[in-house]
Image (cartoon, rainbow, N blue to C red):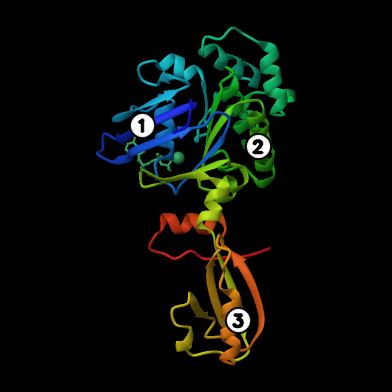
Amino acid sequence: MQANPIISIQQLSKTYASGFHALKSVDLEIRRGEILALLGPNGAGKTTLISIICGIVKPSSGTVTADGHDIVRDYRAARAKIGLVPQELSTDAFETVWSTVSFSRGLYGKAPNPAYIEKVLRDLSLWDKKDSKIMTLSGGMKRRVLIAKALSHEPTILFLDEPSAGVDVELRKGMWQMVRDLQGSGVTIILTTHYIEEAEEMADRIGVINKGELILVEDKAVLMRKLGKKQLSLQLQTPLQDIPAALAGLPLELTQEGHTLVYTFDSQTEETGIAALLRQLAELGIDFKDLHSSESSLEDIFVSLVHADQPATHKEAA
Ligand SMILES: Nc1ncnc2c1ncn2[C@@H]1O[C@H](COP(=O)(O)OP(=O)(O)O)[C@@H](O)[C@H]1O
Ligand SMILES: [Mg+2]
């Protein structure tokens, strides 16, 4: 357990009125100042989890505190700490950017602070659009307006639910930079995504949710080291029908109709066994014309976690 987490979630479960069990006893502590990415396929329960923390959906059981405030018993105090950028793009079409963001601040009972709103709009490159009606803005700008609204009351925790959905690559990069800047200013950020690239790029820690269960939470680097596998592929001079009996027991596989011999090893260990393998191949007279190594990406790891019945595929090393 971490000392003084900013959000503490204990045995949180949610069963919707339909009887659907969307969250199953989730335990999670979110660290102050981190960027946590919640990764999971569609329907995994990411939005449900966020909606409970933000007080939009009622938990069936379990507790959540945000900066020490129970999100049910002490809702207003908890919610004041939180900014939420929802998954669905919905804003008041006829309002101007300035008024919708200022109004949002007012909803939290905060005194007007035009200088702060100006800073938020400038940081989000919305300042020259401040008097534009929201309906006239592009999708990417509308998303930024939602971010501005979420930041309007100076929250210390920001949830971004699928921030990249429908945002083109260029804007996505800009948004990632903005998220990093927010982290730099002390805001804790939780984002959900089903884009692995986004988690890989942004997160300090990664939580994987599948079918309502938080199946792991780990530092990104540790996760990649722990679960990452490397492969050595040897293009054989002469294709093999079968793996020779002398090599049975080694993590070897024949692919491309026997033209390639693939050796899988743990990227953590010092003793990879490669030298021994090459020696044995030489003794058996198995020649190869080329070899290269590859390592599993976060995507491979993710796929192997949520589809435990399917083996991970591998991506070529750069
Ligand atoms: N109001 C609701 N009533 C019944 N089922 C719901 C409701 N909201 C979401 N669900 C179901 O709960 C599951 C998790 O949904 P959600 O939390 O939106 O997943 P994610 O955000 O990971 O895609 C889905 O199967 C979804 O259909
Ligand atoms: Mg969702």
| Relative depth, front residue between 138 and 127 | 127
Q: Using the rendered view, name the quadrant where residue 45 is placed.
A: top left
Q: Which quadrant holds the C terminus?
A: bottom right
Mark 1 to mark 2 CA distance (whole Å): 31 Å
Residue furthest right as drawn: 128
The residue that disc 2 covers is: 175
Camera-side mark, 2 or 3: 3
Other residues around mark 3 within 10 Å, as few (<14) / some (14–19) / many (≥20) = some
The residue shown at (53%, 68%) is 265
Q: Position of residue 129 (x, y in %)?
A: 71, 25
Indicate which disc, 1 or 2, sits on the residue closer to the N terminus.
1
The residue that disc 3 covers is: 278
Mark 3 to mark 1 CA distance (whole Å): 51 Å
The residue that disc 1 covers is: 10
Indicate which disc, 3 or 1, sits on the residue closer to the N terminus.
1
Q: Position of residue 288 (x, y in %)?
A: 64, 85
The residue shown at (53%, 86%) is 258
Callout 1, which amino acid?
Gln
Callout 2, which amino acid?
Met
